[in-house]
Amino acid sequence: MKRLIKAAAVQFNLVVGDIDANLAYVRDALGRVAVQGCNLAVLPEMWSTGYSYRNLNELAQRTPEVLDELARLSREYGMVIVGSLPEPHGEKVCNTAYLLDRGVLVGSYRKIHLFSMMGEDRSLHGGDSWLMVETSVGRLGVLICYDLRFPELARRLAVEGADILVVPSEWPKPRQEHWRALLKARAIENQLFVVAANCCGVQAKLDFFGESMIIGPKGELLAEAGYENTELIATLDFETMESWRLQIPCLLDRKPECY
C-alpha cells in the first residue's frame, strides 16, 4: 500500500438518461485528474444514468459497456476508480458500486439502504452484504449515499480494516447540513479518510448542491467543492492516520460486548 496517495472526487451535473454524455464527461475528468497524479478517483452515484426510473432497466443493459471503458481508463492511468451504476437484476436493477484497480474489477457493492422517501425501494433491488477490498491505494470500504445515515455499516468497514471510505452520492437540497455532519462523523468516529463525490445541478425537480468532500481521520476538511462541476483533489497521508490512531486508540478501546 502506498503511504501517500492523491485522491479525487469527480463532481458534475449528470444528464439523466444520457449515458454517452455522462461517459464523455467522466472520460475527460479522469484524464484531468490523472495528469495531476491522482491514484484514486471517486465518481457520483448512478453517474451514467441518474435516476431515470422510466427506462432504467433498458439503460442498465449498457453497464457492461460502461465498465469496459472504465477498466480501460483505470488501466491506462494506473488508477483505482469507484462509482455506482445500474446493474441488471431480474425485473429491477441494483445500485451497484464497482471498484476498478489498474484495469481489473476487484469488487462490487450493491447499495444496502434504499431511500424509501424517494421510492428507491420500489424500483431497485437492495444489496445484503458489505464490501471492504484491498487495492493498490489501500483498503477501501464502500458506502452509497443513504448508507451514510447508518453508522453501523461504516463501523463494520472500519473494524474490518478500511483505510478509506468512498461515498458515491446523489444527495439533494435541502439536506446539505446532514451531508456535511454525517461525512465528518464517519471520518472522526472511525479515524479514517472519507472521499465523497456528490453530483450538482438540477435534475427534474431535485437540486443537487454538490459540496463533494475529502476528509481526514481527525475530521479535518482536506478539500471541499462548491456547486459547480469540478474535480476535487487532496493528498491522503496514511502515516498521519496511523499516528492519530495510536494517540487516541478508539477502535482498540471499543467494548462491543457491552453495547
Image (tube, rainbow, N blue to C red):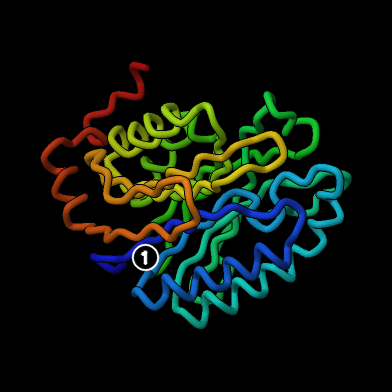
Q: In the image, 116: left or right of 103?
A: right
Give how far across and how far down residue 95 sits, in percent: 68, 46
In this rendered view, identify the residue nearer to me: 51 or 147. Answer: 51
Amino acid type at image mark 1: Val
Q: In the image, 203: left or right of 80?
A: right
Q: In the image, 203: left or right of 215?
A: right
Point out the image quarter for the C terminus: top left
Point out the image quarter for the N terminus: bottom left
In this rendered view, identify the residue nearer to me: 36 or 90. Answer: 36
Give how far across and how far down residue 240 sits, in percent: 17, 53
Give how far across and how far down residue 226 sits, in percent: 41, 46
Q: Can residue 161 be seen in this view?
A: no
Query: At numbered mark 1, what does the secondary structure look like: helix, strand or loop?
Result: loop
Quarter where residue 158 is shown: top left
Residue drawn at (39%, 78%) of the image: 35
Residue drawn at (73%, 46%) of the image: 94
Residue linked to disc 1:
137
Packing grade of label 1 (10 A; few <14, some 14-19, many >=20) is: many
Q: Can residue 125 be seen in this view?
A: yes
Give how far across and how far down residue 104 sits, in percent: 56, 73
197 vs 36: above or below: above
Residue farthest to the bottom, as pictured = 76
Residue farthest to the top, as pictured = 258
Residue drawn at (21%, 50%) of the image: 241
158 vs 135: above or below: above
Q: In the image, 141: left or right of 56?
A: left
Query: Tag count in the figure?
Result: 1
Residue drawn at (46%, 31%) of the image: 176
